[in-house]
Every structure is written in structure tokens, then in C-alpha cells.
Amino acid sequence: MVALTSLAERRAEREDADAYLEAATSRSDVPVPAPRSADGS
């Protein structure tokens, strides 16, 4: 149950971030960070 809760929280955070980035790409006044590489840098 704890694992499912953790996964659900991470999914919600990822969806929030995706929604923010999608909205930010349609606006020019919001800076959009560069994507991270696979090694996290």
C-alpha cells in the first residue's frame, strides 16, 4: 500500500510538471528549463 501511495504521488507530481511545461511553452514570459540527461545532470 505504501508503494502504491508513493507511486501515485510521483505520478501526480510528474503530471503537474508536464502541465506546467506545456503551459509555459505557450507563454513567452515563463522560463522553461532545459531537459535533464539520463544521468541526472
Image (cartoon, rainbow, N blue to C red):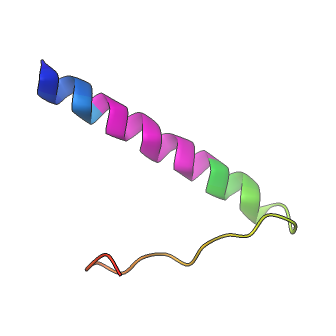
What quarter of the picture does the C terminus occupy?
bottom left
Q: Residue at x 42, y 76 (%)?
A: 36
Specify start and end residues of the magenta stretch as a single range. Answer: 8-19
Number of marks drawn: 0
**Is 32 left or right of 16, judged from the image as shown?**
right
- Up-down relation of residue 18 to residue 25 (above or below): above
Q: Residue lying furthest top in this view?
A: 1
- Left or right: 14 in relation to 23: left
Main SS of residues in magenta? helix
Q: Is residue 14 above or below residue 39?
A: above
Which image quarter is the N terminus in? top left
Residue 7 quadrant: top left
User: Which residue is at a point 14% across and 23% down the rendered structure image?
Assistant: 2
- As for residue 18 lying within the magenta part, the answer is yes
Is residue 24 depicted above or below 37 in this figure? Answer: above
Give the residue at x 65% y 50%.
20
Q: Position of residue 30 (x, y in %)?
A: 79, 64
Relative to residue 23, is residue 40 depicted above or below? below
For residue 20, side relative to residue 29 (left or right): left
Residue 21 lies, in percent from the top left, at 64, 58
Which quadrant of the view contains residue 27? Answer: bottom right
Q: Using residue 28 as the reference point, say whether residue 6 is left or right of it.
A: left
